[in-house]
Image: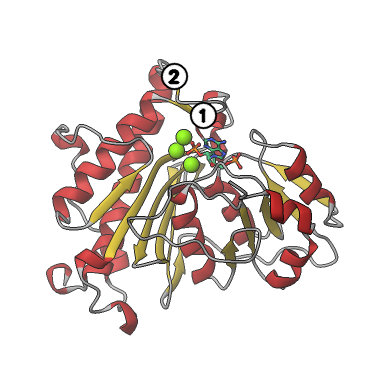
Amino acid sequence: MAATSPVIMRVMASSISTAKRAGGIIRDVLKKGDLGIVDKGKNDPQTEADRSAQRCIIASLANKFPTVKIIGEEGGSDLNVCDDWLVNELDEGFLQQSCPTEWKDVKPEDFVIWVDPLDGTAEYTQGHVEHVTVLIGIAVKDAAVGGIIHQPFYKQPDGEMGRTIWGLKGLGTGGFTAVPAPAGQFIITTTRSHSNALHQQALNAFASTEVLKVGGAGFKVLQLLEGKAHAYVFATPGCKKWDTCAPEAVLEAQGGCLTNINGEHYAYNADVEHVNRQGVLASLGQNHAALVEKIPAEVRAAVGAK
Ligand SMILES: Nc1ncnc2c1ncn2[C@@H]1O[C@H](COP(=O)(O)O)[C@@H](O)[C@H]1OP(=O)(O)O
Ligand SMILES: [Mg+2]
Ligand SMILES: [Mg+2]
Ligand SMILES: [Mg+2]
């Protein structure tokens, strides 16, 4: 089965297994207690968990798919990893499903895999570990098509740590139970560590009943998928293609929408600028275009201006 499955199915199945392994590494680093924090910039920490999880993910995927372009947040990594970090398994449950017709013949050179080995690093260092996710996004040409969102610190009912959510456009999603957000309310999920005056002006323009401030792009999209919020608003540059590729694919495979604050999709080919200059607006079960219109024109003009 595995050897004959289309490349996209094998990339997804391998990414599911690899994200779980990376989640284990992230838990281990925290358990050992020496986070090895390095500041990459303002409000932009990196830890040993980011570095090690990225090495595990990129070494494993590059070993299995040597001709696929892989771009990771933490830059060029030493891919000479121990056998324990080299993941060979493909998630069998995922491979049981049939590949959507539109992706059957996609060639390895048409893919870009965007890797955020640890999304929510600031929160990880501050003890808000439930906000942490591992993100592996699969783009075909410009479009975010497949995604894995793994939560290393999610406690399963049986006590097992970690859960893995996936989405593939044309196939659907798995790993969680979709819940609609409550009617009669409008709950926004947004940044807790990268706010500024313009962003606040955008938030104020919505008649929200509640604003949840949480870390990570992956966790905020999970809040949409599980009905905890109606919209994700981030009206400032700062997050990058590896932050949004996987969340966008999973959310849109569930019928939602993730765009910049002008309502346009980002492109995810290998040559794009990494920064998402025009912020993020994501929603599920809403009129997305109407949400775009709510953001003041002056905020939209200022965000993304070079
Ligand atoms: N100004 C920034 N500099 C670096 N990373 C950012 C910035 N703003 C957002 N991000 C990335 O986007 C994620 C979502 O942002 P926020 O939590 O503020 O809503 C952050 O966890 C971080 O990803 P990462 O933790 O992988 O570095
Ligand atoms: Mg980072
Ligand atoms: Mg991130
Ligand atoms: Mg990261």
Rendered view: 198 above or below 109: above
Q: Position of residue 58 (x, y in %)?
A: 25, 44
Q: Quadrant of residue 172?
A: bottom left
- Disc ID at residue 44: 1
Q: In the drawing, what numbered circle is on residue 166?
A: none
Q: Residues within 10 Å of mark 1 (few under 14, many from 20)?
A: some
Which residue of the protein is positioned furthest toward the bottom in this rendering? Answer: 101
Please, is residue 294 above or below residue 70 in the view?
below
- What kind of element bears circle 1? loop
Query: Residue 153: in sight, yes or no?
Result: no
Q: Hey, which quadrant is residue 284 in on the image?
A: bottom right
Label at residue 37: 2
- Disc 2 + disc 1, Cβ < 8 Å: no
Quick check: 51 above or below 100? above
Q: Is 83 or 284 nearer to us in this picture?
A: 284
Quadrant location of the N terminus? bottom left
Crowdedness of circle 2 by 10 Å Cα count: few (<14), some, many (20+)?
some
Residue at point 21%, 37% (across, down): 85
Q: Amino acid at mark 2?
A: Ile
Q: Is residue 145 above or below residue 104?
A: above
In the foreground, 68 or 132 = 68
Secondary structure under badge 2? loop
Badge 1 residue CB within 8 Å of ligand 1: yes
Left or right: residue 158 versus residue 18 is: right
Name the residue at 78% across, 49% down: 203
Q: Upstream in the sequence, badge 2 or badge 1?
A: 2
Does 128 sit left or right of 173 as displayed? right
What residue is shown at x 36% (from left), y 63% (from top)?
A: 139
Closest to the camera, between mark 2 and mark 1, is 1
